[in-house]
Amino acid sequence: MQRPAFDPASGDGEVASLLSYSRKTWTDAEADVTAEFVQEVRNGEKGVVGPYEAWELWETAEP
């Protein structure tokens, strides 16, 4: 099974739905990821290039 490519032009709502589905499928988290949260993270990450460190990802792990 192959994962479809991620389209960086995907809307915030579409990304939020995908993240919510992933959280509910792979964890016991019940809270949905909102489009507003996705927009906030995207706005804060503009201009970032290169890979992230694990600690950087944990900073935005909980919406």
Image (cartoon, rainbow, N blue to C red):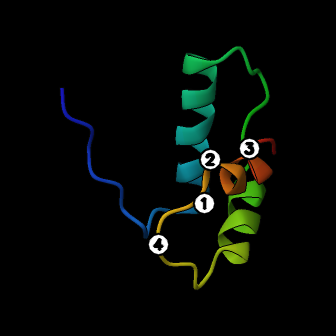
Q: Position of residue 12 (x, y in %)?
A: 60, 60
**Other-residue count near label 2 (Cα within 10 Å), few / some / many at <14 / 14–19 / ≥20:** some
Q: Mark 2 = which residue?
A: 16
Residue 5 lies, with reference to residue 50, above or below; the image says above
Locate residue 27: give its quadrant.
top right
Q: Earlier in the sequence, mark 4 or mark 2?
A: 2
Asked whether the residues under the numbered discs 1 and 2 touch, taking CB atoms below 8 Å apart as contact, a structural biologist would say: yes
Q: Is residue 40 above or below residue 34?
A: below
Image x and y of residue 48, in percent: 57, 79
Q: CA distance from mark 2 to mark 3?
A: 13 Å
Amino acid of disc 2: Ala
- In the image, what residue type sits under mark 4? Gly
Question: On residue 12, which mark appears?
Answer: 1
The first of marks 4 and 1 along the sequence is 1
Q: Earlier in the sequence, mark 2 or mark 3?
A: 2
Q: Residue at x 18, y 25 (%)?
A: 1
The disc placed on residue 50 is 4
Instruction: Kindly identify the residue that appears in the image at 63 percent across and 49 percent down.
Output: 54
Mark nearest the camera among 4 and 2 is: 4
Q: Nearer the viewer, residue 61 or 9?
A: 61
Which of the marked residues, 4 or 3, is nearer the chain's N terminus? 4
SS of the residue under disc 2: helix
